[in-house]
Amino acid sequence: MIRPFTSSPLRYLSFLLCGALGVLSFAPFEWRTLLPLGLAYLFFHLVQMKPRAGFFAGYAFGLGLMGAGVSWLQISLELFAGVGFLASILFTLGFVAFMALYFGLAGGLIARMAGGRRAFDLLLVAPAVWVLVEWLRGWLLTGFPWLELGYAGLDTPLGGYAPLAGVYGLGWLAALLAGALALTVSASLALRAALAAMAALIFLGGWALQSLSWSEPAGEAIRVSLVQANIAQEFKWNPEQFGLSMKKHLELTSAHWDSDLIIWPETAVSAFEHTVRPFLLDPLESDAREHGSEVLLGVPIMDFKSDRYYNAMLSLGKEVGTYYKRHLVPIGEYAPFRSVLKPLVDSLGIPMSDFISGSAAKPLLKVAGHLAGISICYEDAFGAELIQALPEAAFLINASNDGWFGDSIAPHQHLEIARMRALETGRTLLKSTNTGISAVIGPDGRVLERSPLLKEYVLTRRVIPLKGITPYARYGNWPVIGILGLVLLSWAGRPSSPLLSV
């Protein structure tokens, strides 16, 4: 048997490095196999560790993945929240250290449950624990479902399973393959052949599923324009720059009144709706109606009862309606545990950081004669919430402001997340952003057209409304989570046996 490193510092450094290299599996790099390979290496060592050592191994892996993968948080805090270099570093390190606890939990549980047991525990238990803890990270304390393993399955045959099982289904298959790879190191020739056949069947199944279409046209194509005004974040909330910002948006819009739908990004109007209604929104609505078009734009809307406000998308023109953002970003948009953390949020100096969440049962808004599933910024990371718009939604719209993150990897990661949502739901997704990356994403998850980053741009394309529903959109994450739960329940009643006895 191949033995793990005996030198603890070198061993844990190797886990940290594997996690950091795993970031290259995600956009913009898209070296898809690196994270599953790193996970196979981690699994191989975890099943030969005590639970305490397993926790620290998983924690080191998580530090590497999160530290490299969300380094853009420091850029946002220093450049745009104005907290200073040292404070931004400390806050980012604290966030990464906290997120790494989930990976530590997974590592400790795998060492406890799969260590010293049969070979198939490495194949079944370790992947199940990994994905269940990842799912936990996606909703506990409002959730942070970033850099999830399933996204590494995009642009591979595993992507064919997304309409059936969603991102956690893809993550499970990727973890299953990682477990199989770890198992082959000390397995018999017969077992290696069986594992290779299993992997081939998984890939062939995914490849075959990619040829299926889960949706069909629901009407004539509509012409859509996504306005990317590229307003620098440092100027966006400056009252002295408001007029110039609106002038740029209006100029870009006026050249595209032949579109059925024109979309401005999240908080494109950087002032409260009631303060700009007479001189901006009402005239814009009149222009839209005159040209037989509609404008969907982001604007904060005041709730006078609570003296707080919503992050909203407002439709102007033939159809009038409002969507209020439901899943807010902790710290950035509101203070969780308000009585304790409100002073911290205030100290960061983030504009518009006291939003309240909307309560709509379904994130739907009628635009250009069709119901659209709406999400604002971070909301598109939560697939289980976005599918609440299905099957009614003919297409999906995500409005974002990724200007907070500058020329970092964050906008690319966010686009990748939107691609997964389109693939899971079998719907075209229109992604409108302030500074990029704006895009039209097909129902197969492929980017049909995209804007450059940090450039003024208007993306115009004809989009076909769709109908139909994927299995994932119908049932959500529960089938996968239920199966993984059953795997762990079956483990509980089985007798221990040597790790590689087959």
Image (cartoon, grey):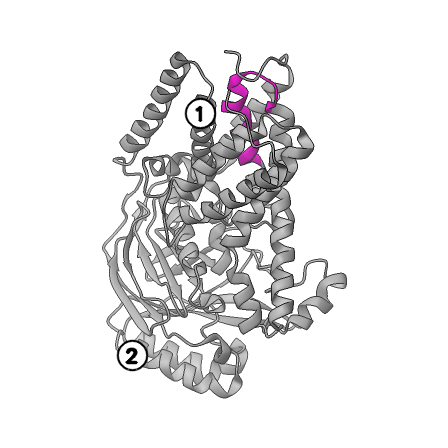
Please say if 341 is above or below 384. Answer: below
Magenta portion: prevailing SS class: helix
Counting from the top left corner in percent of width and height, residue 131 is at: 53, 35
Does the image show residue 322?
A: yes
Does the image show residue 354?
A: no
At mark 1, the secondary structure is helix
- What residue span does the magenta drawing correspond to? 114-132
- Alpha-carbon neighbours of circle 2 within 10 Å: few (<14), some, or many (≥20)? few
Q: Is residue 489 left or right of residue 314?
A: right
Q: Pick whichever of labels 1 and 2 is earlier in the sequence.
A: 1
Q: Amino acid at mark 2?
A: Ser
Q: Write down the residue under mark 2.
A: 254
Tell me which corner region of the image, top left, top right, bottom left or bottom right, holds residue 6: top right
Residue at position x 28%, y 71% from top?
A: 292
- 471 falls in the magenta region: no
- Alpha-carbon neighbours of circle 1 within 10 Å: few (<14), some, or many (≥20)? many
Name the disc covering residue 98, or none: none
Q: Is there a contact, CB below 8 Å, between mark 1 and mark 2?
A: no
Which label lies toward us, 1 or 2? 1
Q: Amino acid at mark 1?
A: Ala
Residue at position x 36%, y 35% from top?
A: 158
Nearer the observer, 12 or 365: 12
Please say if 236 is above or below 481. Answer: below
At mark 2, the secondary structure is helix
Counting from the top left corner in percent of width and height, residue 291 is at: 27, 75
Counting from the top left corner in percent of width and height, residue 139 is at: 59, 46
Nearer the observer, 159 or 147: 147
Please, which residue is most extreme toward the front here? 7
Q: Write down the residue under mark 1.
A: 180
